[in-house]
Image (spheres, helix red, strand yellow):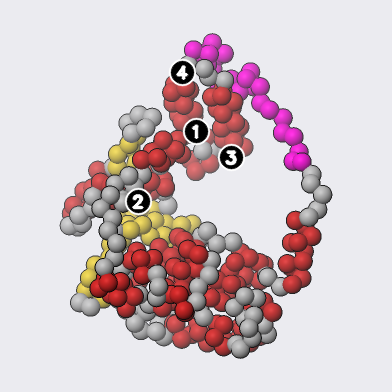
Amino acid sequence: MYLAQKASRHGVYYVLRQSFRDGSVYRSRDVVDLGRHPEKFIIYSDDSHYQLDNVILNVLEEKGVDASEDELEELFFPFLDPYIRYKLEPFRNRHKYRKWQPMGAGERLRVIAETHVLDKRRIHFLRFGHCSMQILDKSPPLYKVLSDKSRDEIEQLILDREMDLQPQEYKNYLFSIFDLQRFFMDRYARAIPSTLDQEKVDEYFLKEYCRLDQDLPFWAGYRRNESTPKYLLRYLFMYFDIAHEGDLSWNSMGQRYRRARRAYRPPASVQKMSVAEAVAVFDVSHEQIAGMTKKQLTRLYRKKAHTMHPDKGGDHDQFVLLTAAYNELLHSRP
């Protein structure tokens, strides 16, 4: 089971989906629609304990989905209260590698054979910042994470990893994953693609893009209509609408070089909030604050943050002020 994101004009919606084998291919199906706020299915019992709403567990049981407690906790971890995430982070994945074993020769060959070449390039680039045909098949453990997954689940996984890319990396990323360097004889084609004829690069990119759109093995098991899948459209937008902002031309490289070597200017000083001002933000007496432990103060902060958070209809500036007051009072606790 995995967490999928669906973009709409109203925002991002989340869905629990499951990959399943159907003959020789893997397909996906929706299991639970979580809406725009999956955190509403999390029930807190105290400062560091929580459980999932029985609604989720009942739906999974009705649909015959066998999900472990650890799997569900991992899926909902990004939506936990920040304080609880901080507390639980050291204990995440503590059992994950206890049964680790190196891949056998047969499994390595199977993973290499079953992984599409575009997936190899993407996973390799997102891990190391580069890729080439000479080294792709030397890293089968990297691709094991894609095994026994539907095309939808693979795209969701890669989409999540692509969020770490910076705009200035987009052009190199697309140039590498579509293997555009093979169309150029220049020795610097791979190292400095920005020096190539950009009209030619655009032309080859569109050809490879269209070829992938018609690649039946790549889309095997994926439910699609006559239009281009959104998973593929994102690369079109990334290439023409976003990547040019991170252009790696000599001119922009020179600008970044000059900016990096400007005289240092210290950041503007920020006026620190006093304890009295912090107490006033919480709207309680100074005596009450003074008698609170860190745990009690945190409980009070979370209670107020629950109503003042922008996602709950609160004011952004007031929420920022509340957080600043909480940090100031927290540091003053013994």
Q: Which residue is mark 3?
A: 316
First in sequence: mark 4 vs mark 3: 4
Does the magenta portion include 283? yes
Kind of residue sitting beneath label 4: Thr
Question: CB atoms at circles 2 and 4 under 8 Å apart?
Answer: no
Marks 1 and 2, Cα distance to the nearest angstrom? 24 Å
Which of the pair 113/12 is nearer the observer?
Answer: 113
State which mark lies toward you, 4 or 1. 4
The quadrant holding residue 189 is bottom right
Q: Which residue is mark 2?
A: 75
Residue at 28 percent of width and 42 percent of height: 53
Marks 3 and 1, Cα distance to the nearest angstrom? 11 Å
Q: Secondary structure at mark 4?
A: loop
State which mark lies toward you, 4 or 3. 4
Q: Position of residue 20 (x, y in %)?
A: 24, 67
Q: Magenta residues, as a range?
A: 266-291
Q: Secondary structure at mark 3?
A: helix
Q: Which residue is mark 4?
A: 293
Q: Which residue is mark 1?
A: 305
The quadrant holding residue 239 is bottom right
Q: Position of residue 85 (x, y in %)?
A: 42, 40
Marks 4 and 1, Cα distance to the nearest angstrom? 18 Å
Kind of residue sitting beneath label 1: Ala
Q: Residues within 10 Å of mark 2 (few under 14, many from 20)?
A: few
First in sequence: mark 3 vs mark 1: 1
Q: Position of residue 255 (x, y in %)?
A: 77, 64
Disc on res. 77: none
Kind of residue sitting beneath label 2: Leu
Marks 3 and 2, Cα distance to the nearest angstrom? 27 Å
Please give the count of numbered marks on the rendered protein: 4
